[in-house]
Amino acid sequence: MNTTIFNKTTGWRILALVISLTLFGTSTVQAKKSSSKSPDTESAAEFVERIQKEGQELAKEVEAAYWVRNTYITKDTAVLAAKAGERSLEFESKLVNQAKKFLGTEMDEKTARAIELMLRGSSAPAPDDPAARAELAQILTDMEGQYGAGKYCDQKGENCRELQELETVLRESRDYDELLDVWQGWRTISPAYRQQYQRFVELGNEGSKTFGFDNLGDLWKAGYDMDTQEFTIEARRLWDQVKPFYEELHCHVRAKLSEQYGEDKVSLDGPIPAHLLGNMWSQTWDNIYPIMEPYEGVASLDVTAALKEQGYDELKMTQTAEGFFTSLGLPDLPDSFYENSMIKKPADRNVVCHASAWDIDNGNDPRIKQCVEINEEQLGTLHHELGHIYYYLMYKEQPSVFKGGAHDGFHEAIGDTIVLSMTPGYLKEKGLIDEVVESEEATINKQMKLALEKIAFLPFGKMIDEWRWKVFSGEIGPEEYNEGWWKLRTEYQGIAPGVERTEEHFDAGAKYHIPGNTPYTRYFLSFIMQFQFHKALCDAAGFKGPLHECSIYGNKKAGKKLGDMLTMGQSKPWPDAMEAMTGQRSMDASAIIDYFAPLNAWLKKENEGRQCGWTN
Ligand code: X8Z
Ligand code: ZN
C-alpha cells in the first residue's frame, strides 16, 4: 500500500521497494556529498518526477491485467497477469538501481522522503534477473489463482463447494463432525502450492538481499519509519498490553464450548479445537455469539435478520456504508465506483472473492471487489473496504509516491473505525434494530459480541507474520511449515487442530494472505489503532460518555479530523499522522482496553474458580 505505482489493499503488490531505513533514512539521504546530481546529471527531484510519470504509464497496464485476473480467473488471464507482473518487477529493479545512486546526496526534504518511500514497501522483491522475475511473477499469479478457484469436492470429485459455502457451515452449524469436515475440506486446496510457496520464499529472500536485507521478513518490517528491531519490540509491546484480556476471553469461551460440545471434545485446560469457533481460520469468533450470549435475549442485535427482512441487496448494503462516510462530510463516491466495482459474486466464473479495494487511475477510478452476502459481517467488510476507498480519494492530489497509508495499519483501520460507531443508537436510526436497550446487561452482551470479533482476532493478527518472519529467516524450514504453523497457533491463540495435521498439509496456505502474499501485521496494528482513532474522533465530536456508547455518525468535526489525516497520505512519517489525529505519537492499546473495561471486569468474575490458560 505504501508506494508509487500500483495500489490494492491485499495481494502481491510488487511495485515498490524497501530498503532499511537505518541504511537509507532521510538524514543519510540528505547528508554527505553536496552534489544533487546523479552521474547521469539528473537531479534527485527530476528523477522522482520522471519515475512517477513512468510508473503511472505502466500502472495502467498492470492494473487492468490484475483487475481482470482477479475478477475472471482463467488460464488466459494468468498469462496476462504474470506478464504484467514481470514488467512491474523489471521496472522495480530499474527504479531501485537508479534511486540508490542518490543516496548520500543532498536534496530537499520532500524529495528525500520520496526516494526513501520508493526504496521500501515491496512485499515481493525479485532478484535482479529476468528469469527469476518471470518465475516469481508466475508463482504469485498461480498461487492466488489456485486459492481463488479452490473448491472442496466429495471423493468422486462431485458436489463441490466453494469457500463461501464452507464458511456458512462454519458460521451456522453446531455439529462437531460436520464442522470438522468442512474445516478439513477447505485445507485440501493448499498442499498443491506448498512447493511453490517454498520457491517463492527463496526468490523473495534473494530479492531482499539485493536491496540490503537479510530476508523478506526484515524487508517487510522496514515499512514503519523505524528500525526493524525496534518495530519487532513495538509489536510485542502492543501484544503484551492486550494479552491478559485475551486470556480471560479465551478462558470463558472454552468453558462455554465445553458445555456445548462436552468435555471429551473441549477439555477445560487445553487449547480449543480450531473448527468450533465459527470461522474458517478461528480469526474472529463473533459467529458463535449465540453460544456465548451472557444475558439471554437481552437487547438482541440481530442485524443480519433485519437486513434480510428489509430486502437489502448488494447495492443497498454498499450505499449504506457510503452513507456513513458522507454523513461525516466526506465526498460522495464517484459514479465510476458503482459502474466498475464488483460487489456481487458472478455466477458463471471463478473470481478471487477475498474482499479488496483498488486505487485505479490515480484516485480517478477507485473500486472494490467483494462477493457481498447479505449479513452483518459483510456490511462491516463493506465499511472496511470503503475506508480504503476514502483514503484513496482523500490523498488523490498527493504526488503518487505519497499516495499510501501513513503506514499499512492506518489504511486498514479507517473503515473499521467507522464500524465502531455503528452503535445501537445508529442502528435504530437506520431501522436495523427496533429499540435501544440501555442496561448493564445490554452493555455486556454488546461488548461480548464485539470482543469475540476484535479481541479474539489479536493473537491471530500477530501470529501470521510471526510464522512468515520465521519462514523467511529459515528458523522454520520448508520441512516444518505445518508444525511451525500449529506451534504458533497454539502458543498465541490457544487453539489446536481437531484432527492430526502433518507435513502433507499446508494449513498456512489455506488463509488468503499467504498465497496472496499480503503482509498481515497491518491488521494486528489496525485492530489496536482503530480504538485509538475512535476515541480521538469521539473527543473531536465532543462526546463525553463511555467510549462504547459513542457514534460519530453525522458529525462534521470528527469527519474533518479524519479527512485531514487521510489527505496527508504517506507524505510524512506515520507518527505525524498519528499526532494529527490523536495527539499521540505512538500506537497504544489503552483505548481498546478502556473500551472493554465493563466486559473485562465481567469476564474476570465469570472466570473465578476456572483454570485459565493452556499448555502448548
Ligand atoms: O483481508 C482483509 C480485508 C481486506 S484488506 C477484507 N481483512 C483481514 C482478513 O480478512 O483476514 C480484514 C480484517 C482481517
Ligand atoms: Zn483492508
Image (spheres, rainbow, N blue to C red):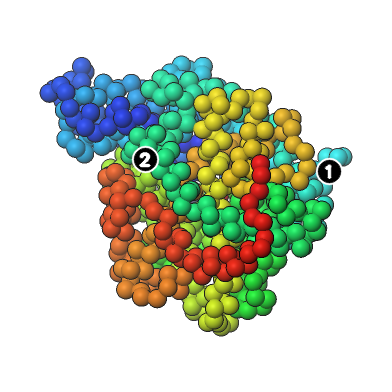
Determine the residue positioned at 40% across, 63% down: 534
> With 86 as the anchor, is 152 left or right in this view?
right
Amino acid carrying mark 1 in the image: Asp
> With 613 as the anchor, is 541 left or right in this view?
left
Q: Which residue is mark 2?
A: 224
Within 8 Å: ligand 2 and the Cβ of disc 2?
no
Determine the residue positioned at 40% across, 76% down: 545
Residue 246 in the image, given as x and y percentages of width and height: 56, 55
Q: CA distance from mark 2 to mark 1?
A: 45 Å
Amino acid carrying mark 2 in the image: Tyr
Determine the residue positioned at 42% across, 40% down: 233
Image quadrant holding the N terminus, namely top left
Q: Which residue is mark 1?
A: 154
Label 1: how many residues lie within 10 Å, few (<14), some (14-19) or many (20+)?
A: few
Q: Earlier in the sequence, mark 2 or mark 1?
A: 1
**Relative to the observer, which residue lies in front, 182 or 86?**
182
- SS for dot 1: loop
Residue 466 in the image, given as x and y percentages of width and height: 53, 37
